[in-house]
Amino acid sequence: MPWKPFKTYSEKGRHIISDNRYMVVATSDKKAKPWAAPVFFAYDSKYNFYFLSAVDSRHAENISENPNVSIVIYDSTSEIGLSDGVQIEAKASMVDEKDVARVIKIYCDRLFPNSDVPATQRYKPEQYSGASEFRFFKVQVVQTYVTGVDRRMDVDLADRDGED
């Protein structure tokens, strides 16, 4: 992603997030054994992040033991010295069953932005709730940082009018 003159670091962070499709979710189990997994992500207007995963994946099992996670979003194709990213401290959990249809819409709008197929027809809510093998997960931001070469700035992604 080429450098662009952003008014704030928050604006830069929102740009990095909107321009990338994958994030790395770092989890740890109750014994603090770490694990990192790349996942496709979607996000809502409050910058809650969502991903779909098997409930028996290592990161999903870790989340059930320890909801504290961190995520990183960056362009891995950037030239050396031009890398920027977003680092986030967060809490993760399975999406509540009452919210599955809403999250499916958010997810499909990002994954299939030009599709005429309704989101809940493509991903049926009943297939992602209860004892389903796959579930949607929500990552709620605690703290966000925009990074660059040798620096890290604390930002508020949802504060569109504020200064950093």
Image (tube, grey):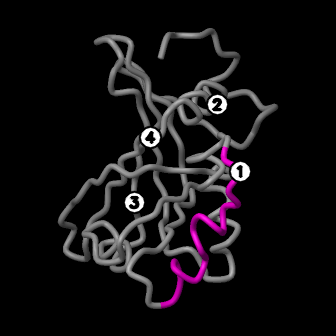
Give the residue at the far right of this rendering.
161
- Span highlighted in magenta in the image: 115-130
Q: Which of the two discs, 1 and 4, labels the residue nearer the N terminus?
A: 4
Residue 150 lies within the magenta run:
no
Q: For mark 1, what is the residue? A: 116
Graded by Cα atoms within 10 Å as few (under 14), some (14 to 19) or many (20 or more), the crowding at tag 3 reads many
Q: Could you say whether the residue bearing mark 3 is in a helix, strand or loop?
A: strand
Q: Position of residue 67 (x, y in %)?
A: 42, 71
Counting residues from the start of the chain, the first of labels 4 and 3 encountered is: 3
Give the residue at mark 2: 10
Q: Quadrant of residue 69?
A: bottom left
Give the distance between the C-alpha atoms of the residues marked 4 and 3, in whole angstroms. 11 Å
| Amino acid at pointer 4 | Gln
Pointer 1 and pointer 3: residues touching (CB < 8 Å)? Answer: no
Category of crowding for the residue at label 1, using alpha-carbon neighbours closer than 10 angstroms: few (below 14), some (14–19), many (at least 20): few
From the image, state whether disc 1 or disc 3 is nearer to you.
1
